[in-house]
Image (cartoon, grey):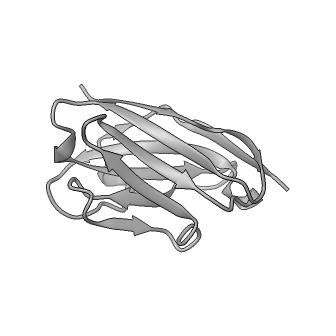
Amino acid sequence: QVQLVESGGGLVQAGTSLRLSCAASVRTFSSYVMGWFRQAPGKEREIVAAISSTGGSTYYSDSVKGRFTISRDSAKKTVYLQMNSLKPEDTAVYYCAARPARVGVTLSSARYNYWGQGTQVTVSS
């Protein structure tokens, strides 16, 4: 059973930065595509960023491109989301997700098999 544990959320002011972490309890971390999603109150869950199993391919939604960076550390079995220049509209619960796949990135939440419990990010103006 795969377990994902997010950390790093909090309350910050607009323009500042946060780094989210997601630690995965898996045997072969390099076999999983990883993604970060977020869900704001009253809105559907949306993809923020995704990274391939090797880290060679990444995807960012238009709303975060140029501000957020997704990365992974195989030794620590952890995926990160560095969030810079935060805006109030980034306020949401952020979820980490994993899908066993060898190639590419996965954008659809329906295709991810495992999810973390979520971490709240609140950006004040």
Of 77 and 101, the residue lying toward us: 77
18 horizontally vs 110: left or right: right
Dividing the picture into quadrants, the one containing residue 125 is bottom right
Q: In which quarter of the image is the N terminus?
A: top left
Which residue is at 30% across, 53% downward?
111
Which residue is at 33% across, 58% downward?
51
| Residue 99, horizontal then vertical, whole percent | 26, 47
Q: In the picture shown, does residue 10 fall above or below 108?
A: above
Q: In the picture shown, does residue 57 fall above or below 102?
A: below
| Residue 118, horizontal then vertical, whole percent | 53, 36
Which residue is at 52% across, 43% downward?
20
42 horizontally vs 30: left or right: right
Which residue is at 58% across, 55% downward?
83
| Residue 90, horizontal then vertical, whole percent | 67, 57
30 horizontally vs 121: left or right: left
Q: In the picture shown, does residue 1 fall above or below 52?
A: above
Of 51 and 18, the residue lying toward us: 18
Of 44 and 80, the residue lying toward us: 80
| Residue 25, horizontal then vertical, whole percent | 28, 27
Q: How many marks?
A: 0
